[in-house]
Structure formats: structure tokens, C-alpha cells
């Protein structure tokens, strides 16, 4: 696998054309069989909520991995996490940690993905990135498995995926579009705080305890208290309160529905998204 070009190089590629077949072409050729050899899988962000869930699902699905390598930032390296009744040692996510890795699952935030995903790809790993870092890059496929799986064929080491709300919604939109046609979609999603991460869960729990004790609720992750509240956000996840936008840099992420539109899926449909964060933990 050739090394992935720099992010700047990817963005500056002129006249970019996807080298994949049309999304609606039906092929009768058999798909190649899956490689049956055991794989080495790295999970980056393994101490976080999503990283733990990724590890749990790999074990539940009996994924053919000879090694599951749990990685996290330097401050979390050396910790142990308990998944599926087993204790796992967490290593530090460095470029060298991806030597010998076949698949690297990233869910450690955009900055980590920007820094380390190209390093993992250069060492031969296929990166599946769960952050927003690569979603708008025209040379990185943004894939929903039930909608555009063929786009994985042209990846250069990194595959991006949308967020959870988009992942489950677009297969339905695709079916409706292809069956009866769509012109405009208004989407409201109601997000649990776990979608923002472990710090948001801890903040919610602390605010609930403060409320019960009659103490002030302190906000750090969100710009306003989330306990017993609902915080609507615009397509850039800027919390909308009282008609003004209060930007919180920990929340900034383009709406993945519009990401997909900009990447060529549903480009003919007007998409109007609204996200609301609320008290549910999940």
C-alpha cells in the first residue's frame, strides 16, 4: 500500500475524480472472498467510551484478530481497562505503535487522527476513522457500508465514517430517494451526552448531584448546564441559546449529512439539520 500523501496534498489535488463505478451500477461479478488470515487490529482512543465499545464489539463478533492492540494518549498509556471480563493493557499511540497493524480503528478526536492516521497508513494499516478529521477531504472516502461500500476500493490508507446519527439515517434516505425521490430533508436529532465523550458523562453526573444538593451546576464541556436541560445546536454544533450562537471548540464538527452531500451523496437534496443535546446518558 503506498503511503498516504500529506493532508495538504490531498486537499490541493486539482481535478479530482473518483475512480469508482457509479453508485447505482449493479455488478454480477462475485466479490472477492475475505482474507481468512488472522489480523492485528489497533483501537486508538481505547480508554474512551467509543474505544471501549469498539473493543467490546470486536470481541462479541469474534472478529478474526490475532491481536487487539489498545492504544491511547501518553497520559492514558500504561492504564488497564476491563472489557468483556478481561483486563487489557493500554499502550501509547505513537507512530511506531502501528508497526504490524492491519486495521486501525480511530476514535480519539480529530487532532489525533490528523497526526497519527497518516502514520498508521504509511506503515501498511487501513485506518477507519471515527472523527470528523477526514470527512470533508475529497481524497478520503466517506463510507456508509449499506450506501456506498464500493467507495472503499479507492482508499489510500484512510476511510472516514459519518457520526452515529448519519450512519443509521442515510440508508433510509437512499431507499426513499431511489424509490420515490427526495427534494428536501429536515432532520432533527436528539443526542445523548455520551456522544460527546466521557467528560460529558462525568459533567452530567456531577450536575445531577449538584442539583440534588442544591448547589450550582458547573459547566465545562458544554457552555451551559446539560442536566435537566436540552441544548439545540446548529450544523456546526454551536450551541444555540436565546437566538445567539455560543461557540464551544470541543463541540465543533460539521453535520455529517452535509458532509455526505459535499462528498457527492445526496448532493441534489436540500438538507436542513438540527442537533439537540439533552440529559440522557445512554
Image (tube, rainbow, N blue to C red):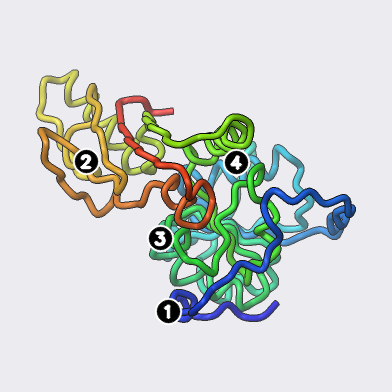
Q: Which residue is mark 3?
A: 110
Q: Crowdedness of circle 4 by 10 Å Cα count: few (<14), some, many (20+)?
A: some
Q: Position of residue 175 (x, y in %)?
A: 62, 33
Cα distance in 3D space between marks 1 and 3: 16 Å
Element on which disc 2 rests: strand
x 54%, y 75%: residue: 119
Q: Nearer the viewer, residue 230 or 83?
A: 230
Q: Which residue is mark 1?
A: 8
**Mark 4 sits on what residue?**
83
**Quadrant showing the N terminus:** bottom right
The crowding category of the residue bearing disc 2, from other C-alpha atoms within 10 Å (few below 14, some 14 to 19, many at least 20), is: many
For discs 1 and 3, the disc positioned in front in the rendered view: 1
Q: Earlier in the sequence, mark 1 or mark 4?
A: 1
**Point 39% across, 41% down: residue:** 271
If you read the primary sequence from the N terminus, does the residue marked by circle 1 or circle 3 appear first? Answer: 1
**Which element type, helix, strand or loop, lies under badge 3?**
helix
Amino acid at each position: 500500500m503506498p503511503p498516504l500523501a500529506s493532508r495538504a496534498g490531498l486537499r490541493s489535488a486539482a481535478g479530482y475524480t473518483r475512480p469508482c463505478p457509479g453508485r447505482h451500477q449493479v455488478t454480477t461479478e462475485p466479490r472477492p472472498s475475505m482474507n481468512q488470515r488472522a489480523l492485528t487490529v489497533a483501537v486508538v482512543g481505547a480508554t474512551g467510551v467509543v474505544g471501549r465499545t469498539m473493543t467490546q464489539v470486536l470481541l462479541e463478533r469474534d472478529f478474526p484478530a490475532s491481536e487487539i492492540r489498545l492504544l491511547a494518549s501518553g497520559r492514558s498509556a500504561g492504564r488497564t481497562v476491563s472489557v468483556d471480563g478481561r483486563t487489557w493493557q493500554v499502550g501509547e499511540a505513537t507512530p511506531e505503535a502501528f508497526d504490524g497493524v492491519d486495521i486501525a480503528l480511530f476514535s480519539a478526536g480529530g487532532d489525533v487522527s490528523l497526526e497519527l492516521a497518516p502514520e498508521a497508513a504509511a506503515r501498511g494499516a487501513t485506518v477507519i476513522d471515527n472523527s470528523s478529521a477526514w470527512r470533508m477531504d475529497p481524497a478520503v472516502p466517506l463510507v456508509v457500508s449499506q450506501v456506498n461500500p464500493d467507495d472503499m476500493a479507492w482508499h489510500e490508507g484512510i476511510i472516514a465514517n459519518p457520526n452515529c446519527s448519519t450512519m443509521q439515517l442515510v440508508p433510509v434516505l437512499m431507499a426513499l430517494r431511489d424509490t420515490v425521490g427526495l427534494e428536501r430533508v429536515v432532520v432533527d436529532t436528539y443526542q445523548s451526552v455520551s456522544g460527546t465523550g466521557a467528560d460529558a458523562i462525568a459533567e452530567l453526573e456531577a450536575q445531577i448531584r449538584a442539583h440534588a444538593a442544591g448547589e450550582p451546576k458547573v459547566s465545562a464541556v458544554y457552555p451551559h448546564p446539560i442536566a435537566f436541560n436540552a441544548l439545540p445546536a446548529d450544523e456546526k454544533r454551536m450551541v444555540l441559546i436565546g437566538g445567539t450562537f455560543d461557540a464551544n471548540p470541543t463541540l465543533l464538527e460539521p453535520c455529517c449529512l452535509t458532509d455526505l452531500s459535499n462528498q457527492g451523496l445526496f448532493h441534489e437534496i436540500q438538507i436542513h439539520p438540527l442537533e439537540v443535546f439533552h440529559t440522557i446518558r445512554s
